[in-house]
Image (tube, rainbow, N blue to C red):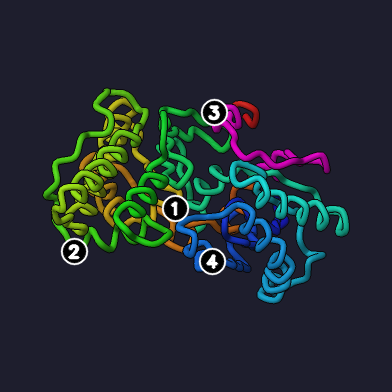
Amino acid sequence: MNKDIRILAIETSCDETSMAIVKNGKVVESLTIATQIKTHANFGGVVPEIASRMHTESITLVLEETLKKFSGKIEDIDAIAVTYAPGLLGSLLVGIECAKTLSLVYNKPLIAVNHTMGHIYANNIEHDIVYPTLSLVVSGGHTDLLILKSEQDMEILGSTIDDSIGEVFDKVARVLGMPYPGGPNIEREALKGKDTYQLPIPMKEENFNFSFSGLKSYVINLVHNEKQRNNEIRISDLANSFQTTAVDEVIRKVELALKKTGIKNMILAGGVSANKYLREEMQKLCEKYGVTFHVPNILYCTDNAAMIGCAAYPLYRAKKFADFTLNAKSSENIKKYIEENK
């Protein structure tokens, strides 16, 4: 394909209203992110009704700002892409209706993008994804280990059987009295402490699935019991022990996958990939096995529309367009999505 392809992408799956213009699935020509974190911090987490209302209030302003940063005009756009799943239903619908309107008014094809695939393709912005590659997706909704054989051929090795690692970070942070979002606060507090608490290994089985609910429950019960006994809770040490235990379990499963597959490329994706300890441990593991490791810039780890534009590009090339019956899905089995888009 000789012509440059520019995609206007929209991401509203949770509490960020974001739009971007991405060229050829790689070059971010414009990006705007309007976050709602300060609002939801007052409630200790994202309130779906408030999130969708705030998306509605800011979506046109975000569009205007994105086009203002772009050197061309909206008529120069080749397609409109939008996150349709998974996420908060009301939030997703705001982005989808905006995308449908732009698609209709400017007669541009509409592309439906899975949010998880967006996180994976964020790795294409500053580095080229080399196939085959092992991909670990860690976020507030996902903990998935995949083999990317090509753009259209992927295989799920394992997923969480209960809570995602990002969800557990947030819930442990809350019980330790830290504000939302919990993950970054756990990381900051862990730097001040030491791994002194003996916490259970989340899942000892030698397979590729993950489980974090037991670890979460153990920490919650530990904090509750210590408070009942009027014992001091060493917040920094407990944060360090929790982070170490959770991340080490992820590293253990990735190491199993590297040994079994022999794959020499590894990418990290999702909001939790912004965690410095996880990034450092993954780098050490990959160096141990002679594996090339890449992780997106921090800006592209958390929810943003640039990653959606990247994930939309292979769908554009394959002419996999959506029609105006496109609807939001609060959850979507990633395995099913991969099978349907081969």
Front residue of 239 and 340: 239
| Of pointers 1 and 4, the one earlier in the residue sequence | 4
Q: Label 4 vs label 3: CA separation? A: 34 Å
Tag of residue 88: none
SS for dot 3: helix
The location of residue 178, given as percent across then percent down, is 34, 60
Q: Label 2 vs label 1: CA separation? A: 22 Å
Crowd band around label 1 with a 10 angstrom C-alpha radius: few (<14), some (14–19), many (20+): many
SS for dot 1: helix
Tag of residue 335: 3
Q: Which residue is mark 2?
A: 192
Front residue of 14 and 228: 228
| Of pointers 4 and 2, the one earlier in the residue sequence | 4
In contact (CB < 8 Å): disc 2 and disc 3:
no
In contact (CB < 8 Å): disc 1 and disc 4:
no
The location of residue 135, given as percent across then percent down, is 42, 40
Crowd band around label 3 with a 10 angstrom C-alpha radius: few (<14), some (14–19), many (20+): some
Type of residue at label 2?
Answer: Lys
Q: Label 4 vs label 2: CA separation? A: 28 Å
Residue drawn at x 30%, y 38% is: 217
SS for dot 4: helix
Give the mark toward the camera: 4 or 2: 4
